[in-house]
Image (cartoon, helix red, strand yellow):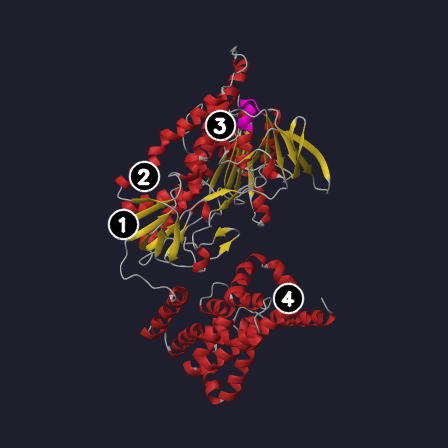
Amino acid sequence: MTKSRKILLLMVVLLVATFYAFGLQDWLSLEAFQSSRNQLIEFSRANPVVSSAVFFVVYIAVTALSLPFAAILTLVGGAVFGFWWALLLVSFASTIGATLAFLLARTILREWVQRRFAAWLEPINRGIEKDGIFYLFTLRLIPVFPFFLVNMVMGLTSIPAFSYYWVSQLGMLFGTALYVEVGAELGLATSIPGIFSIGVIRAVVALSLFPWLARAVVNRVRSHKMLRKFNRPRSYDANVIVIGGGSAGLVSAWIASHAKAKVVLIEKQRMGGDCLNTGCVPSKTLLRAASVAHLVSRAGEFGIRAGNPQVDFSAVMARVKQAIATIEPHDSVERFEALGVECIAGEARLLSPWSVQVGDQVITARSIVLATGARPHIPHINGLDTVPYFTSDTIWNLTTLPKRLLVLGGGPIGCELAQAFARLGSKVAIVNQSETLLPREDRAVSLFLQTSLEKEGIRLLNGCSISGFDLAMEGHVALLTGADEGVTQQESFDVLLVATGRQANTEGLGLEALGIELASNKLAVNEYMQTAFPHIYACGDLVGPWQFTHMAAFQAWYAAINAMFGTLWRFRINYRVVPRVTFTDPEVARVGLNEKEAQEKLIAFELTEYSLQDLDRAITDSDNHGFIRVLTVPGSDRILGVSMVGTHAGELLNEFVFAMTHGLGLKKILGTIHVYPTWGEANKHVAGLWQRNHAPEWLYRWLERWQKFMRRG
């Protein structure tokens, strides 16, 4: 920071410190105004120029220094000067003060605001780049952020100062008028009953309704701006068109059909999407076969002689296909047609916010729900196309068990499939760019899983990436690099599984032609699952932020309901309670915050940890390993999040999901009867541990004295 900027900053700090040091804030309160109300009004009438000038200068100073008294001054101005003159004074004073605060931020606060309000700055910057003037006008008209923060943050953008001035003047005018009107009505009141006069009530009601009305107007203007170049149909072929027959699309169609809407469902490949055909169903079927093989290999622990399991890989894969075939009717065309849904096979392309083309057919609907899912992400690696590699979509085409499987990616998919193939007999290694597996989880959770996988013979190559491939006598070789540049080691393999995440299916939908933008390679939606067009909704893996089947179904409910009834009432989605499970052995399960996220977000918490080593049912099952970690609000039993690793962790998590969803704390879990001996008792034990940690020691001392007294007879 330059010397002149430091001097300017020091001057601002001294002014603010002086303001509070001399107790000037006491003069800018409603109590102070109420005690001297009549005198101020009489003085302003006797000295209109002087009183107006003083008020004008004070208002500018308060706003420029971002002091929290502008709203009170606006009310006082209305009460002292009357509506029209106060509106003139406040409108110009507030805008001049806001512009000065804007210039101060631009001059001296750039680094501090960037660091302190980085999360808030990101969406504002995106808005400024897209449509700065309209975005600023929206912020002024609808105070989503405090005005002092708008002043500072806007100072960090490239918007011109003059544009900032006139947009602020116009945008704040309506809200200023309402505040001044409330103050004017209060100024006219001569008694306590007068405060509750029709005029005051009318002004207060108008002030409370203003943000809602302003938001409706802004949304209407934005909608008109987006839709004006398209011809809206006079009538529609359907109420809702759903594009995509995966989990999100099927749930959307199911909900809409049950609401008696005319629904058209378009799917270009297979009904059921990834979950049925290449994701949840086949992977969990494979994991079950692998767990049986592993259990057989552990038979000696239970006093049973079974020998080493003999795996028939072709039979295992046949069972995977059978599981898909058995569940397939649940997601079939026949089932949804029986529900009244018109199912069309083909590739859909948006022609307008109300029309979709499928082949030579054009279908119109009042609303459209996009649920096209995602596909495996394929990284750019030299020579990848020269080696036998598979993804989570294509691994099910294997007919023989690979002797050496190299897994690229240490996320949930990579860990699950790596363990499954290792238990079926493959020699498995995981190449993971992060320092630990499952990098989003707490380090203790990740390290526990790593230890378990290593005990089963899986090699973990953490902190590594594949830079290329080579061909050797023993087969294919991956060239690995670590944190430092240069080749550090080589890893031989027969089959490569690429599990480096998934990317949204947005190609071919016609999004670019409509002007619908992507955010981080996903389709951007608001809290109502709407895209930039209010009639087009999206859900599931296409939008994220979590690519889980249960989250796709959760989002689909909001997308479908809002698509049908959004003109009457809309429902806002809430991601406060989002459960997730990695189905390794031991399972890794989480809901809400973990310790890592809480620390990153500077959220205070208490940590209670219970070891499954002490759980009776875990001991009888010879699976007494793992732990449950619960984060709570300090001094309270309100649950912020739960992380656990262990056998049946996914099942144990459900009780915490229910508790968090319905606002129940650990005391309610502790007060619930849990069957003995079951795994569910672990939840009660961790709640009991929290209770013991918060036991009032002083009460126990008095109880000890009381019991001692009672033994005297």
Q: Which residue is labeled 2 in the image? A: 333
Residue shown at the point (47%, 89%) measured from the top left: 46
| On screen, residue 489 above or below 561 | above
Q: Which residue is labeled 1 in the image? A: 261
| On screen, residue 619 above or below 151 | above
Image depth: mark 4 or mark 2 in front? 2
What is the C-alpha distance between the residues marked 2 and 1? 17 Å
Residue shown at the point (51%, 79%) measured from the top left: 92
Residue extending furthest front? 360
Q: What is the span of residues highlighted in magenta in the rendered image?
A: 419-426
Image spot of residue 296 (x, y percent):
51, 17
Q: Amino acid at mark 1?
A: Ala
- Label 2 sits on a secondary structure element that is helix
Image spot of residue 340 (x, y percent):
26, 43
What is the C-alpha distance between the residues marked 1 and 3? 39 Å
On screen, residue 185 versus residue 405, left or right, reads left
Q: Amino acid at mark 3?
A: Leu
What is the C-alpha distance between the residues marked 4 and 1? 54 Å
- Label 4 sits on a secondary structure element that is loop
Q: Amino acid at mark 2?
A: Val
Asked whether the beta carbons under mark 4 and mark 1 sit within 8 Å of each other, the answer is: no
